[in-house]
Image: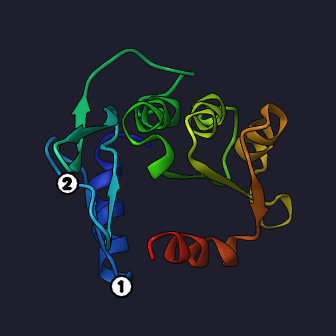
Amino acid sequence: MPEKFTGAFAARLNSICEIEVKEAVSGDRVIPGRALIAPGGKHMTVKRSGAQYVVEVQDGPLVNRHRPSVDVLFRSVAKWAGKNALGIIMTGMGDDGARGLKEMYAAGARTAGQDEKTCVVYGMPKEAVKLGAVQQELPLQAIAGLIEQYGK
């Protein structure tokens, strides 16, 4: 996502969603009822801090031609949250996120991907499926329910 777009995107989502949506800043806690969006032009990672998970936002090289990169985020989740995590890869071009989701799966996380029928572009989920990183494919309409079920 491009710089300067993510702040407005997060604000728009926050105005229409039942949960809080915000552009992430370093130190934000990962908590139920909050969605954090990586700022354009920055990578976002998750780390454990005591009994909590927090995000770090940082510069870094492009990964898979992207910054932010889903692989960077998912690899940090695999390392710090492992089996306590749920990873979902949704519509998008390319393969960013596929290898990171595979690392999450290998670390014991539950994983899912958006199905081809409901994707605008099936690239990212398709690559994750090919790698064996996706435990179940779901239509877009079922993904919120999966997240809600996982959170209980």
Q: Residue 116, located in which quarter of the rendered image?
A: bottom right
Q: Is residue 130 left or right of residue 53?
A: right
- What quarter of the picture does the C terminus occupy? bottom left
> Hey, what amino acid is under mark 1?
Glu
- Tell me if mark 1 has few (under 14), some (14-19) or many (20+) residues whose alpha carbon lies within 10 angstroms of its own: few
Q: Is residue 122 left or right of residue 36?
A: right
Residue 21: x and y, percent?
A: 30, 67
- Asked whether disc 2 touches disc 1, contact meaning CB atoms under 8 Å apart, the reply is no
Q: Nearer the viewer, residue 39 or 78?
A: 78
Q: Residue 43, located in which quarter of the rendered image?
A: top left
Q: Residue at x 79, y 37 (%)?
A: 132
Q: Residue at x 84, y 35 (%)?
A: 130
Q: Residue at x 33, y 78 (%)?
A: 19
Label 2 to label 1, Cα distance in Å?
18 Å
User: Helix, strand or loop at disc 1?
Assistant: loop
The residue at the far top in this view is 61
* Residue named by callout 2: 29
Q: Residue at x 78, y 59 (%)?
A: 137
* Residue named by callout 1: 18
Residue 94: x and y, percent?
A: 70, 34
User: Helix, strand or loop at disc 2?
Assistant: loop
> Hey, what amino acid is under mark 2?
Arg
- Tell me if mark 2 has few (under 14), some (14-19) or many (20+) residues whose alpha carbon lies within 10 angstroms of its own: some
Residue 85: x and y, percent?
A: 47, 51
